[in-house]
Amino acid sequence: MATRHPRLYALHADGTECPRSGPGAHRYTVSGKPLTAGCPGRTCWVAECRCGWSITASLKVAADEPRKRHSCPRPPA
Ligand SMILES: [Zn+2]
Ligand SMILES: [Zn+2]
């Protein structure tokens, strides 16, 4: 089953991914302060598709909205 939408993930200042789910997920307070030891906090959000499309934004919603609207360009028949 193909992924319907591009992947959305958060980045630390050093460019590493801030995991959002799973046993190693970095947790945050509701105000956005990191709770996980060693997590410097999220600096930006990236939506990235397998077709090569990607967008980087400082706010989650600014990356998530275009991600939801994205549809991959179809290769010429
Ligand atoms: Zn983190
Ligand atoms: Zn795509």
Image (spheres, helix red, strand yellow):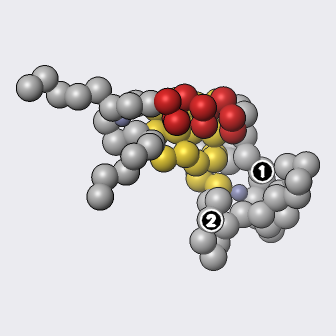
Q: Which quarter of the rendered image does ligand 2 occupy?
A: top left
Residue placed at 82% from the left, 58% from the top? 28
Report x, y in % for residue 10: 63, 47
Q: Secondary structure at mark 1?
A: loop
Q: In this rendering, does residue 14 appear at all?
A: no
In the displayed structure, 19 sits above or below 50; it is below
Report x, y in % for residue 34: 83, 57
Q: Nearer the viewer, mark 2 or mark 1?
A: 2
Q: Mark 1 — residue? A: 41
Work out which quarter of the rendered image holds the N terminus and state it.
bottom left
Q: Secondary structure at mark 2?
A: loop
Looking at the image, tell me whether mark 2 or mark 1 is earlier in sequence order. 2
Q: Nearer the viewer, residue 47 or 70?
A: 70
Q: Is mark 1 within 8 Å of ligand 1?
A: yes
How packed is label 2: few (under 14 Cα within 10 Å), some, or many (20 or more)?
A: few
Q: Nearer the viewer, residue 14 or 49?
A: 49
Q: Nearer the viewer, residue 55 or 14?
A: 55
How far is mark 2 from mark 1, CA to CA?
15 Å
Residue placed at 60% from the left, 71% from the top? 22
Q: Mark 2 — residue? A: 21
Residue placed furthest toward the bottom: 23
